Structure formats: C-alpha cells, structure tokens
Image: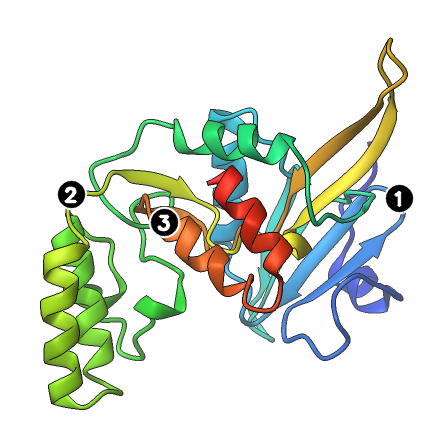
Amino acid sequence: MDEIPTIDQIKAATELLSPEDATMKVVKIGTKFAVKFGRAVSLVEAESMRFVASNTSVPVPEVFATFSDPQTKINYIVMEFMPGQSLDIAKQLNDIMKNLREVEPPNYLGSVGNQALPDGVFWDPDLDKAITGPFTSESALNEGIIQHLTRTEAPGQVQLLRELISSTLIDHKAVFTHGDFQPKNIMIEEVGQNQDGQRLFKITVIDWENSGWYPEYWEFCNAMIGATFRPDWLVLLRRIL
C-alpha cells in the first residue's frame, strides 16, 4: 500500500490540478493520490464523501486520510486521484442523482453529523446557529436565510423576501445534496466497451465541500447558477434533476 504523503511532500508537489490562483489547492502525488488543502478547506467535505460512499452507489473519490497543521492552520484531505476530464453531459448522471436523493434523511437540515450547512448563504462571522444551522425544519432554514440577508439588504427588501419565502419555500423533503453540481465537478474515464461495441465510461462526482441535507429544490437552483452562460447545461439539468 502506498504511504500517505507527508505535508512536506504535498508542499513539494508540482502537478497542480486546481487553478493557480485558487485559495484551496489540489495537487496530484504519484499515480494514486490527489490532495486538497488550504485554510478554507473543511474536513466536513471528507466526512460527506465517506457518507456518500457508504450509503449510496454514487462514485466518489476514496478518502485515505485527513489532517490539519496546527502551526499553519491548513487542512488536508488525501483522496483517490480520479483520471479523466471534466464532463459536460452523461446519461448516467440521472441515475447518480436519483441514488443520492434516495438516502433516508435524518431529522435535521445540515451537514453530515448534524453540523452547520456549508453553503455561503448560511455563512455568519459570529457562527450564529440560527443562521448557520443545523436546522430542525425548513421554516427554521428559511428564517436563517432571512437573518443572513438582514446583514446586507435593506429592511423593505428583507420584508418582501420574508413574505415570498414563507409562502413558497414550504413542505419540501430533505435530500442529500451535492451543492455544487456543475460540469467541472463531473469526471469521466473511458473504461472499455460492452458486447455491442459501445464505449463504457466511469463517472465520478468530485468536490463535495458544499454537500449536506438541504430542501429538495436546492440542487437544481444552485446548478442553475452554473448554467447562466451554458444553455446546454440548463437543458441537461431538466433531464437530470
């Protein structure tokens, strides 16, 4: 078994998989490992990947180790390197997302382990749980969104949004949600052919840092943001989600 790379080996890695200016870096080490690291990296992402691997058949990278450097406060996730290129379309995505959403939900809306939701909508500098979650109900989650908006929006606009949200965002199921479902986070690797000569592909969904238990509409709405300049992705989303 390959040795888990050390912090020094990670720092010395030269094969960068993330954009050069990204605050969270991803590097490839050897043929087996990809390491995601940075102060903004949340180890909850590793918990989410392990949860998905244990409770669904959704392909995710295997997590080998997680650790933090107490001196630099940098977090590290050592995971399986997934070969392939980012994918724009794939029929298997519909089955993958169905499988993910069939997992029995807990009695809260939040990250794996009854923790705060990682989406920026719920970020709060004071870590106020009324804003960050976890939430016991959709109405509590809605109130968290409203409280977050009071920090940046005018009172009149907040009141209007409160009325709209309270009358529309109700009675949704809690489903496990990737939270950043877009082409750059879908990897494809050709693995051979079937008996009819058709090409076979392995699809892996990566980047689970925003995942958790959200209302069932959340995945589609977030993925729509990634479709702003991608009409082909928008069309595909309607077939997937």
- Dividing the picture into quadrants, the one containing residue 142 is bottom left
Dot 1 alpha-carbon crowd within 10 angstroms: few under 14, some 14 to 19, many 20 or more:
few
- Could you tell me if the residues under marks 1 and 2 are in contact, i.e. CB atoms within 8 Å? no
**Which is more N-terminal, label 2 or label 3?**
3
Of residues 142 and 49, the one nearer the viewer is: 142
Q: Residue furthest top?
A: 195
Of residues 207 and 156, the one nearer the viewer is: 156
Residue found at x 52% / y 56%? 180
Which amino acid, by three-letter code, is at mark 2?
Asp
Dot 3 alpha-carbon crowd within 10 angstroms: few under 14, some 14 to 19, many 20 or more:
many
Which amino acid, by three-letter code, is at mark 3?
Ser
Which label sits in the foreground, 3 or 2? Answer: 2
Residue on which the image places disc 2: 171
In-image side of 7 versus 195 (left or right): left
Dot 2 alpha-carbon crowd within 10 angstroms: few under 14, some 14 to 19, many 20 or more:
few
Q: Describe the element under mark 2 as helix, strand or loop.
A: loop
The image shows residue 15 at horizontal and vertical percentages of: 88, 62
Does 194 appear above or below 83? Answer: above
The image shows residue 82 at horizontal and vertical percentages of: 77, 42
Which amino acid, by three-letter code, is at mark 1?
Thr
